[in-house]
Image: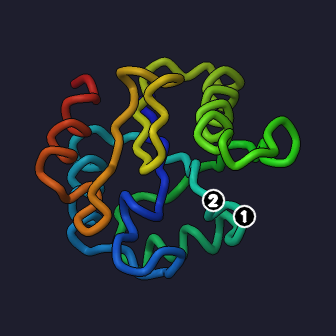
Amino acid sequence: MKTLFLDIDGPLSTNNFSGIDLNPECVKVLNEIIDRFNPNLVLSSDWRDHHDIDETNTIFAWNKVKKRISAFTPNLWGIDFHKSSQLEECRAKEILKFIEKNNINDFVVVDDLNLTPWLGDNFVLVNDFIRGIANEKIKEKLMNKFKE
């Protein structure tokens, strides 16, 4: 099963960080990915600290995302990681822990934190905070990461 690990603020929510309004153009791209690859959606975002899975899925439905989040990655902040300089490593290790526990082989991670050192080719960096994953270059990279 293909799995997409999603960060929200940056990749999908570009105008109002931590708000519930996702960028409609980003939702359109996410829905294209869902239609084409049908990935399992796992939330790796800090949103898991503010919304439970039902609230997150209500927000997704309200924003017309075609699929629901199935799980959250574990939160290792304050347990294994404590310094702001460790934020990227912490996020990557949370994802890797989830991958190992659930025997996931086919996955893509999208985030505005640079997780490349830990996730390599399975990672897409979102560095356009206005367009998020709707940025054509980012969308193309994301689509190309999934294997048909």
How far from the left and from the top, in percent, is residue 118?
53, 23
Q: Is residue 95 above or below residue 84?
A: above
**Cα distance between the residues tagged 1 and 2:** 6 Å
Report crowding for label 2: few under 14, some 14 to 19, many 20 or more residues within 10 A (C-alpha): some
How far from the left and from the top, in percent, is residue 109?
43, 37
Q: Residue at x 11, y 51 (%)?
A: 136
Report crowding for label 1: few under 14, some 14 to 19, many 20 or more residues within 10 A (C-alpha): few
Q: Which mark is residue 109?
A: none
**Contact, mark 1 vs mark 2 (Cβ under 8 Å):** yes
Residue type at mark 1: give it.
Answer: Asp
Please tell me in which quadrant of the rendered image residue 80 appears.
top right
The quarter of the image holding the C terminus is: top left
Q: Nearer the viewer, residue 122 or 36?
A: 122
The quarter of the image holding the N terminus is: top left
How far from the left and from the top, in percent, is residue 84?
69, 49
Residue pointed to by mark 2: 46
Q: Residue at x 65, y 49 (%)?
A: 72
Left or right? Give the position of 73 relative to 66: right
In this picture the colour scheme is rainbow
Please tell me in which quadrant of the rendered image residue 13 appears.
bottom left
Q: Is residue 61 above or below residue 45?
A: below
Q: Which mark is residue 49?
A: 1
Q: Secondary structure at mark 1?
A: helix
Q: Is residue 48 above or below residue 59?
A: above
- Label count reads 2
Residue type at mark 2: give it.
Answer: Asp
Q: Nearer the viewer, residue 148 or 93?
A: 93
Q: Residue at x 37, y 63 (%)?
A: 12
Q: Secondary structure at mark 2?
A: helix
How far from the left and from the top, in percent, is residue 102?
65, 26
Q: Residue at x 72, y 64 (%)?
A: 49
